[in-house]
Image: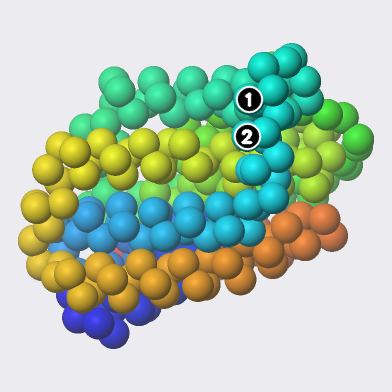
Amino acid sequence: MNWFEAIILGLLQGLTEFLPVSSSGHLELGKVILGIDAEHSLMFTIVVHGATVLSTIVVFYKDIWQLIKGLFAFRWNEETQYVFKVFVSLIPVAIVGVFFKDEVESLFTGNLVFVGSMLLVTAALLTFTYLKKSNLRKINFIDSFIIGIAQALAVIPGISRSGSTIATGLMLGNKKETIAKFSFLMVLIPIIGANMKDLLGGEMTQNEGVGPLALLIGFITAFVSGLFACKWMINIVKKGKLIYFAIYCVIIGITAIAFGTI
């Protein structure tokens, strides 16, 4: 992987991590188009995901700091309840990560037909949000778990994590601004945990075909573009414009399936 390819893939990750179009699916499509071996570039995927986590922390640093202060007040206050809801949402993805890690990794092989099909599933989820009217319901613990199931399913390339979690929250009747923030904050711990696990497990040394410069460039590009996309996505959810991304996912999904069958 050269520096130009790292920029392209970093941009793809940074923009699509927050936009409801599946960052993992676009990364797989990008690797296929650029002729990059998907199986030997897993570390690059992990690094650019870490960059978008940092973007999320920067955008929501005030909210995160408020939650930390509330949590260490050692009271069952609003902040403590919010943190516990986040942990409840992590249960499904933790189960997938512990018991189905190898099965998930086997999906990242650049299969265009599979990725395209999952993008169509993402389009369907986003379309449902257009038909379902949002209300002012607050996220409760049951909602958190259901949204967590959506996040667990989004480990599949082509299923948008932000799209599936936000769509699920909206279909449950949660407030638009509330579910957008919850969707972005709930992903912090899983990605940080996965990165730390791979780092401590020696995965950083098993990075065939991707040099340190490409990793650095990809990280910076994903971080900067992620800052822009995160703020943009919050405004998009508030305005209820997700249907346009459903149309986009249909177009890209059908195109991927078409090229995959040639």
Residue under the image location 39 percent in, 49 percent down: 157
Identify the secondary structure beneath mark 2: helix
Q: Quadrant of the N terminus?
A: bottom left
* Residue 186: quarter of image: top right
2 and 1 marks in contact (CB < 8 Å): yes
8 up-or-down from 19: above or below: below
Say which quarter of the image contains residue 82.
top right
Q: Label 1's element?
A: loop
Q: Nearer the viewer, residue 218 or 108?
A: 218
Task: Rate crowding at label 1 as few (under 14), some (14 to 19) or many (20 or more) other CA atoms within 10 Å.
Answer: few
Q: Amino acid at mark 1?
A: Phe
Q: Is residue 182 visible?
A: yes
Direction from residue 91 to residue 147 in the image, left or right? right
- Residue at the image position 58 percent from the left and 67 percent from the top: 227
Question: Which residue in the protein does label 2 denote?
Answer: 68
Q: In the rendered view, would you say 182 is above or below 38? A: above
Residue of label 1: 72
Q: What is the CA distance from the residue labelled 2 to the residue labelled 1?
A: 6 Å
Identified at 71% across, 29% down, the residue is 70
Residue 47: image location, x then y, percent = 31, 57
Place of residue 20 in the rendered image (x, y in percent of width and height, measured from the top left): 60, 55
Amino acid type indicated by mark 2: Ile
Name the one closer to the observer, 211 or 172.
211
